[in-house]
Amino acid sequence: MTTSTNENDLIDTPEEAGGAFADALTVLRIAMMPIIVYLIWKGWQPVAEGGIDIGLTVLASVLFFVAALTDIFDDFLGGNERSIYRRFGYLDDIADNILVIGTLAALLFVIHRADMLTWTFALPALIFIGREIFVGLFKGYELSRYIWPDTKLSNAKAGLAMLATCLLLASPWLQNWIDQMRAGTDNVAEVFATTSPWVWIAGTVILWIAAILSIITAVILFRTELDDTLLEDVSLEDGE
């Protein structure tokens, strides 16, 4: 009895190996999202139920940071999503969106559960989530024909959203660490009495910028699609 091997499944070159490893990192990024969401759900409890578990929050932050790093390494090892050496390159942007959207949605839930949700965080988070879901559905259809090209604005939007989410997720323990550093040189009681949530504020400001860029890039995306559709219609009419 003999078995046949598909030649397309063989990895014969370093480039193909890099592409396969990049695809694995992309899939890993998707797989890490539910773990991070679970840690947020368990770690950010209402004050009456124990409050924030710093250990779980640190773990969630570390996993998110590692997941974000995989986005850098998969492009470095296997090329971008359009690389001929990647079989699942089209999942690259989807993995980024799943990671950020899942984490932001989890933060919205736990903060609302704690009765501490404010519009300054909720609005940009919902704008970003809504935009990514809507455009993602649109791109999902268009991906059957071609992959949308990246632009500087879209890359900036994605990078800022990842940075903002990382800061927001790490804000409890990072702010605590900063306060402890301040307490080492200043009056301890005064420092902890005037704790400033500047890490959360910084994350929220960056998220606002990412949300604004998400709207701008969505408008550009659909305007480009509309212009292309009109050109196709004109070409068909001229052909007739």
Image (spheres, helix red, strand yellow):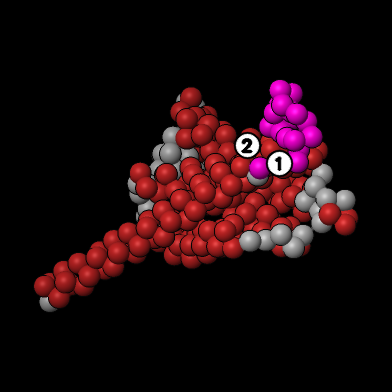
Foreground: 83 or 219? 219
Residue range (magenta): 177-196
Which residue corresponds to the image point at 37% horizontal and 47% vertical from the top-left?
153
How many numbered circles are shown?
2
Tags 2 and 1 in contact by the CB under 8 Å rule?
no
Which residue corresponds to the image point at 56% horizontal and 50% vertical from the top-left?
204
Foreground: 230 or 158? 158
| Dot 1: element | loop
Which residue corresponds to the image point at 48% horizontal and 24% vertical from the top-left?
14
Q: Which residue is mark 2?
A: 65
Query: CA–CA distance between discs 2 and 1?
Result: 29 Å
Q: Can residue 7 be spotted in the picture?
A: no
Q: Is residue 151 left or right of residue 97?
A: left
Q: Position of residue 44 (x, y in %)?
A: 77, 51
| Dot 2: element | helix
Q: Can residue 207 be spotted in the picture?
A: yes
Q: Is residue 85 above or below residue 169?
A: above
Q: Position of residue 89 (x, y in %)?
A: 48, 44
Q: Which residue is mark 1?
A: 194
Which residue corresponds to the image point at 59% horizontal and 57% vertical from the top-left?
121
Sequence-first tag of 2 and 1:
2
Please identify the residue farthest to the right as the structure is shown: 49
Q: Quadrant of the C terminus?
A: bottom left
Observer-side mark, 2 or 1, equals 1
Query: Neighbour class for label 1 at 10 Å: few (<14), some, many (≥20)?
Result: few
Indicate whether residue 195 is drawn in magenta.
yes
Q: Is residue 206 left or right of residue 173?
A: left
Q: Amino acid at mark 1?
A: Thr
Query: Neighbour class for label 2 at 10 Å: few (<14), some, many (≥20)?
Result: some
Indicate whether residue 142 is drawn in magenta.
no
